[in-house]
Image (cartoon, grey):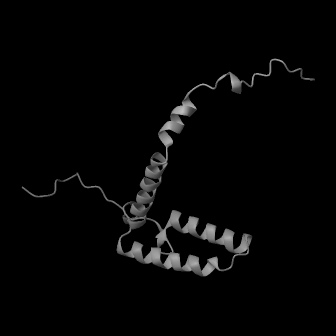
Amino acid sequence: MSARLEGLEVPLHRSLVEPMLLAGLPRTVALVLWTSVGAFAFGLHQIWVLPLGMGVHLAAAAATRADPYVLDIVALAVSAALVWRFFATGAGPMLRMMDEPMGEAHDHSHHDHAHAH
């Protein structure tokens, strides 16, 4: 019996399995990086951001060349750290407080006010 079964093969284009890169970076990362650099450099006249952006781009491109999904892992780690910090700094009591109805001292119903229309 052969390893391949006739009729069960599907041609798959490489573009469907490889990440879309723009100048060596994932497209979203490149667009966010250079939009931010452009806003700081040209909008806020902070020209020193241009070489910093080039350095970040080169470092991220080198990391992407080694592993195309490394920036996804970095984004996931940063997101996990932010969620941990959110809950470590008292998010639970704050969210519970926001779920409770406001008391009479905070009544904004405006029953006693006359409005001219």
Please state if 48 lies on the left or on the right of 96 as rendered.
Answer: right
The residue at the far left in this view is: 1
The N terminus lies in which quarter of the figure? bottom left
- Determine the image quadrant of residue 19: bottom left
Q: Position of residue 96 (x, y in %)?
A: 51, 33
Please state if 77 lies on the left or on the right of 99 as rendered.
Answer: left
Q: Position of residue 25 (x, y in %)?
A: 48, 71
The residue at the far front in this view is: 105
The residue at the far top in this view is: 111
Nearest to the observer: residue 111 or residue 54 = 111
Residue at screen point 73% across, 75% down: 45
Residue at screen point 18% across, 53% down: 6
Nearest to the observer: residue 19 or residue 85 = 85
Vertical order, 26 against 51 (above or below): above
How many marks the image carries: the answer is 0
The C terminus lies in which quarter of the figure? top right
Q: Position of residue 85 (x, y in %)?
A: 46, 52
Please state if 116 lies on the left or on the right of 72 as rendered.
Answer: right
Vertical order, 77 against 43 (above or below): above
Please state if 93 lies on the left or on the right of 111 as rendered.
Answer: left
Nearest to the observer: residue 99 or residue 89 = 89
Residue at screen point 43% across, 56% down: 81
Residue at screen point 52% across, 80% down: 55
Q: Position of residue 73 (x, y in %)?
A: 39, 61
Nearest to the observer: residue 33 or residue 117 = 117
